[in-house]
Image (cartoon, coloured by chain):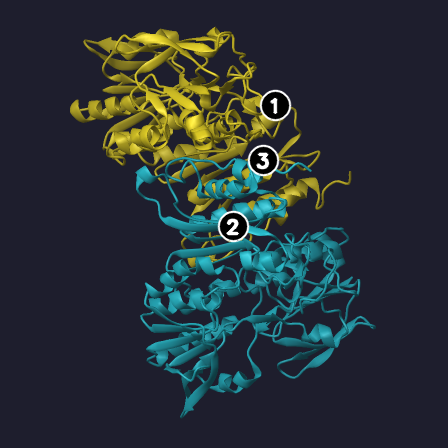
Chain colours: A cyan, B yellow
Amino acid sequence: MRVAVVGGGAAGMATASRVKRLLRDKAEVVVFERDRWISFALCGTPYYVGFRVKHLEDLLHYPLSEFTEKRGIRVRLSTEVVEIDVGNKRLYFQEKNGNSGWYEYDYLVLATGARPRIPGEWREFLDYENVFTLHSLDDAERIRSYIARNHVKHVVLVGDGYISYELAENIRQLGRAVTIVGKHEYPLSKAFDEDMKDPIISALESNGVQLRLGQPAKTFEVEGEKVRRAVLDNGDSIEADAFILAPGIAPETRLAEKAGIKIGETGAIWVNEYLQTNYAEVYAVGDSVETTDLVTGKRIWAPLAPVANKMGFVAGSNIAGAKVRFPGVVRTNVTSAFGVFLASTGLTEREAVGAGYEAVAAILEANTKARYVGSGRKIVLKVIADAKTGRLLGAQAIGDETAFWRINIVATLLMKKATVWDLFFDDIGYMPLTNPVWDPLIIAARLLMRRLGLSPPKV
Amino acid sequence: MRVAVVGGGAAGMATASRVKRLLRDKAEVVVFERDRWISFALCGTPYYVGFRVKHLEDLLHYPLSEFTEKRGIRVRLSTEVVEIDVGNKRLYFQEKNGNSGWYEYDYLVLATGARPRIPGEWREFLDYENVFTLHSLDDAERIRSYIARNHVKHVVLVGDGYISYELAENIRQLGRAVTIVGKHEYPLSKAFDEDMKDPIISALESNGVQLRLGQPAKTFEVEGEKVRRAVLDNGDSIEADAFILAPGIAPETRLAEKAGIKIGETGAIWVNEYLQTNYAEVYAVGDSVETTDLVTGKRIWAPLAPVANKMGFVAGSNIAGAKVRFPGVVRTNVTSAFGVFLASTGLTEREAVGAGYEAVAAILEANTKARYVGSGRKIVLKVIADAKTGRLLGAQAIGDETAFWRINIVATLLMKKATVWDLFFDDIGYMPLTNPVWDPLIIAARLLMRRLGLSPPKV
């Protein structure tokens, strides 16, 4: 059996590894990777920029030899798949050194990932040496060495999402000035409702990050060999020594589309619950595919690393003959900067209203530990529920690392379609050094019970 | 309506507060408290001994005036209820100053808590000034001032449960030698299986705590006005300047028993899901009552502070006319010393086998964060499941504070009767500074899936 995997990121390598683990010598597994790295931790790239991670190789989950020698996977680096001939079950690849050819497969796995969503009119500026995106290990290397070698005093981060949030911390730690330019009223507005914006803004501003929000960057001004200014929609311009463009990402579907593989309503590759595309022998996994939102039951694009890894496990198992279903996600995510963790799961209140729910929310600020031990920090917590049924719909938390863990508890409840009353009675442990006896999560449930009643509605 | 509450701890005050909140002037609520404190945080007493908490008053969740003036509750301190006349709905109380009388109630709430389970033959030693229990704020005060004023160099903690574990840290922080004497092979053996014992022992020993385990203390030797030695079952004796007896606790049911209120199979007060005893107008809440173990479906005594507080909320709501069910618990608990957190939920493997399950377990040591950011710590995690159905039965974790939070996630799954496959697909978030992309919890599920198969069994 011949299995071709397009893309050597987390999802691709997880799939390849799983097939080999189950089938061993009964399967030939070839991974085609356009770049020179596989099994790379893209999520770690901001920490490479900030020198918290010293070597690029540290960002590989495993060295190449683990896959090639130990797991018996064939890895073709610097090899791009440029065409898939689904009818004949073969793909056409081109190596960077000029070689090219067809590879015939029994199973194909698309793990093409995502790509920065750079507007067409900005593309030309990417040719300048002081303009970057951060979407590969090589990108991280370019940014880090440029900052080190070019007396960069001020970096503009174009985009108000999690990449800018994490880069802001890391570039500040290098002692450089940082400005975030974003079109939304506050950073991370996709995952956080407006009533959560103050602690987000404060985490950045209190650590010296300049914010220019509510104004999309429109274009850039060149001086000599470099881009010198970002120009905002209102005409203002911001001068800087380097510019990192992080306006968002999009699923990398071009290869699939060209091959006639079905694209879903979200714009990502459509797959069934076994992670098969509309061609049974073609699987797709990771940041290029859509899945099911277990809160709404609708299709969703959720490009997140743990999801990608689990999809690889599922697809690999199924290629090897199992029948494992990937159930879907609740979109739990987390980012952090300057010790402030921002985590969310499920729907925001805005999304819940948009999806037609009669959303109610509880928002509170609370101490993370028993008051009297004196070591707690504040977190802000918001929990959203459906007024009709009491079902939990989502949650957001900002504060110390426990904000993240508390959100994981709500995520777990969302996975089980649990209610506000389930949250109230959830048997979360307690001791003074870990949390208050009435944990903020339980208080949030109590606040929601004021609106929804003390018991579940009778069906 | 007249509501009498016996016991001013967390459960009693939560009940009283809830009734007043819902009924306001329509209810007279009187709390009878034997001692001089109400709404006290017993869990904080070890930190008072160690001076992390400075004032005894800091251990009150609220000052007395919050209850009496703001919430309109009548509080009778230093007043013991010595008899309940259930047939005539009245109780007899005695004040420490000699006054006594009957109080007629419409509803009675027993919140009598638990008491140290001191063997009869040890009672006489409690009369010595250097022998203590730790089960009240006054106990904490006595211990702290005795250590400070009497050149105490060495304290023996008799008992290998969580009180000794937490006291060990606090007394070591005072610069005194500490020995734990316990009859089990390792501390906290009720909540942790034997394959988890090494990190527990190491947390204590590496911080200078002497362990004398597998040998129950048998008696004590007196010299002059003081107890001078603890004598072990094998005849060994340990000399020390102070002795704290913490061999465990038992539900305080004596008043209830005498009144003919039903005691359950666990030895604690029986209540139905509305927290009513066998007399509909008599409720019981907190550490003196039993509840349902949601893993086994059996009755269990689970004296834990968050449970007590929620029971108070439920009983108070029901007295005020609601019909709220208390569903039961999964016995999530946590303790910590020297920065090592020990958390568990559900059944241990030993308990699972004892309860007739075909138990399988995964145990692993893992880093708490992405390897490359360098700030993670090790945790040891064990997850137990039923081989027949794949249902999760329990989990234990030891390590940094995230051990506690990971256990809360399993607890949440236990509350929903979830399986190993639910754990694998649980949408736990990820970023390098919070956890590895394959969180230890997910790896535990993967290990269990090797034994149980990749998908749930078909029903």
Are discs 1 and 3 both within one chain? Answer: no
| 3 or 2: tag closer to the N-terminus | 2
Whole-percent x, y for residue A309 in the image = 61, 57
Are discs 2 and 1 both within one chain? Answer: no
Q: Residue at x 52, y 50 (%)?
A: A361
Q: Which mark is residue B298?
A: 1
Q: Is residue A96 left or right of residue A24?
A: left
Are discs 3 and 2 both within one chain? Answer: yes
Q: Which mark is residue A361?
A: 2
Give the amino acid at mark 2: Ala
Eye-nearest disc, 2 or 1: 2
Q: Chain of mark 3?
A: A
Q: Is residue A163 left or right of residue A38?
A: left
Query: Outermost residue toward the front?
Result: B26
In the rendered structure, are the residues bearing label 2 and label 1 in contact, judged by CB atoms less than 8 Å apart?
A: no
Whole-percent x, y for residue B306 in the image = 46, 32
Give the residue at mark 3. Answer: A455
User: Could you tell me how far apart the alpha carbons at marks 2 and 1 are, in whole angstroms?
Assistant: 35 Å
